[in-house]
Image: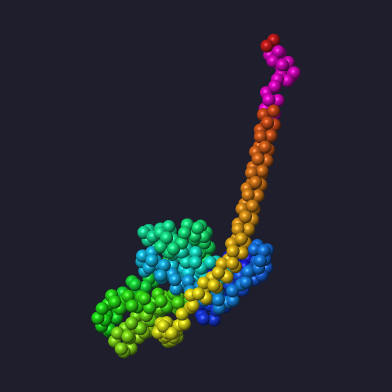
Amino acid sequence: MDDEGPRHYQYLFTKEALEQSHEAAHERAAQTLREQGLRVLQAEPRPLNLKESCNLVAFYAQKLPELCRLCSAPQEVLWTSLIFFKRFFSANSPMEFDPVPMMFTCLHVACKVEEFRDLTLERMLQEGGMGEQMRPKVTDLELELLQALDFELLIEPKVRPSLRILAEELEERSKVADLEEAMQKAEALIIDLCASTNAVLQWPTSVLIAAAWDVVLEEAAEKPSPVCSMLLESFTEEQHKTQLKTMFQEAVQAIKQINCKAELNREAMLEIAKAARKCEKAFVRIREEQKQRHEARCNERKRRRNEDARTHFTDIEELKRKAQALREDVKKPTFQDDLVRCMEED
């Protein structure tokens, strides 16, 4: 990844590519700490290892749905904020950016994107048990998030509307006793899967939605659902059918294995979070130094422009004075002018 130019953030990865992206972000942060940590903190912080970093991000990703429930945020806001969070940390390290304020930043930006005006930042911090001291941290990270997302903020498709469309398409093939209950269950499966794993970075959202609906229908009818076969009917190329079927089966398997995933130990995660914040302090100071240097360069450019403008203005004024002097010389009567005038009068 080119450190000199803007970073490119992709949103869908193979498992291997995602691991490489995490490794690159981790190594970039660790190297910065090794090179500058001691200088800015007077004590070199201990970098997290890669597993600790990934687990810490996963731990706070699972806290995001809980925060949304506390704030009474609608499902579309939860979905958007969760995707923002996952995409951001697909190429950034929690040593560089604290996941806690970033969690609030993702939710705050998601409220703006989804035009949910009932949830202010003040109320969000209050419901999340955070004081006003968190506010500047949240707002400072907003630009970092927007740049990481390359300002691509529209998140589609949304889970609930897509599930409804899919249910209507399959209404004749699969009878569901309680459609609303089935959709709520499928939606909960998707949120749980995407909060606890990197599924939303590995498979298209449409595939995850179809896979969740497949699992719900299969459990309700106790027989294979027609979801996959219906999706395959839309394709003519065998290669595309094979790719879709593989993705669909992998997503279904991931959903079925959610409950088998080991739960992260809360106390251990809080200790890792403390270590990560020590690292993050170094990056905060480094960013402050970069900001100061940037402002100094801007002020210097502004000073030079003002000096150039004053010099230019002085040059113009000097030219005006010379022009005026020339005009006066032209108008001033000479001896010959006076002699000619006398002769004319005679």
**Is 48 situated left or right of 257 in this image?**
right
Residue 97, above or below 322: below
Magenta-highlighted residues: 326-344
Q: Position of residue 25 (x, y in %)?
A: 58, 72
Q: Is residue 43 visible?
A: yes
Query: Where does the N terminus fall, quadrant-wise?
Result: bottom right
Q: Position of residue 6 (x, y in %)?
A: 58, 65
Pick the residue in front: 225 or 99: 99
- The residue at the point 33 percent across, 78 percent down is 185
- The residue at the point 64 percent across, 53 percent down is 297
- The residue at the point 38 percent across, 68 percent down is 69
What is the image's colouring? rainbow
Pick the residue in front: 96 or 79: 96
**Is 28 situated left or right of 170 in this image?**
right
Q: Position of residue 125 (x, y in %)?
A: 44, 61
Pick the residue in front: 179 or 168: 179
